[in-house]
Image: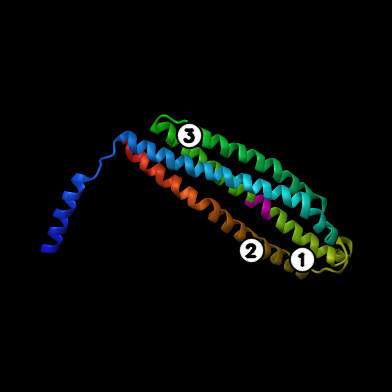
Amino acid sequence: MKELDLLKKDWKKREKNLPKLSYEDIYKMILKKSSSSVRWIFYISLLELGLGLLIILFYHPNIGKQIQLPGFIDFFSYISIPVLLYFAYRFFQNYRNISTTSSVKDLLESIMKARRTVRLYIILNLVLGGLASIITFIYVYVDQQGGWNIFVQKAQIKDYLIIFVVAVIATLIVLAALLGIYLLLYGFLMRRLKLNYKELKKMEV
């Protein structure tokens, strides 16, 4: 107990010498951290956009020669570009809004908007990826059996059930991989924004 009391006294002495941060100093620190997080979100979205363009321009034609994919897969590929461009713009707007805020209330709103945009972006990508995955798997499987007409003639109910279950399992694996990647890329930044938001809420009281 004596050692504990000595430690407490020593801490109190040190605490007096520590610099005390003002309300404005704390706000600036949180603003800087939030701005940095949203800036990195914007950079990552640009990287995704660049990778998407490279895949469509260079790799997609080669894949198409080996496996005859349906036309709607091209639609999914090309529709992803304007989606990425839109969200890259939204992420940039969020970064600019956070960087120019001048009050705790505005910063709180900007952080909430930034987090909502990231969540919407992840959900939309998972939905598009899931749809493309399950439809592509079924199409490729049926195509390998000789086409839809031949498959329908030979297939029984169990064949439909098997292809559906396997397609769902394969899609869940793809979605799990995508979710893992997004959590790795954006999860840390989102947690930082959440912590900053909580600190700002304390300041607002």
Residue 40 image point, x, y percent: 53, 45
Towards the viewer: 37 or 174: 37
Residue occupying the far front of the picture: 17
Q: Amino acid at mark 1?
A: Tyr
Does residue 90 appear left or right of residue 53 in this picture?
A: left
Image quadrant where one finds the N terminus: bottom left
Identify whether 105 is placed above or below 178: above
Residue, disc 3 = 99
Towards the viewer: 139 or 69: 69
The residue at the point 58 percent across, 57 percent down is 181
Identify whether 102 is placed above or below 51: above
Does residue 154 appear left or right of residue 14 in this picture?
A: right
Identify whether 110 is placed above or below 52: above
* Spatial CA span between label 1 and label 2: 20 Å
Number of other residues with Cα within 10 Å of mark 1, as a class: few under 14, some 14 to 19, many 20 or more: few
N-terminal of the pair, mark 1 or mark 2, is 1
Residue occupying the far left of the picture: 2
The residue at the point 71 percent across, 63 percent down is 167
Does the magenta portion include 29?
A: no
Residue, disc 1 = 160
Residue 193 image point, x, y percent: 45, 45
Q: Amino acid at mark 2?
A: Ile
N-terminal of the pair, mark 2 or mark 3, is 3
Res. 173 in view: yes
Q: Amino acid at mark 3?
A: Ser
In this picture, which residue range is highlighted in magenta?
Answer: 126-130
* Spatial CA span between label 2 and label 3: 38 Å
- Secondary element type, mark 1: helix
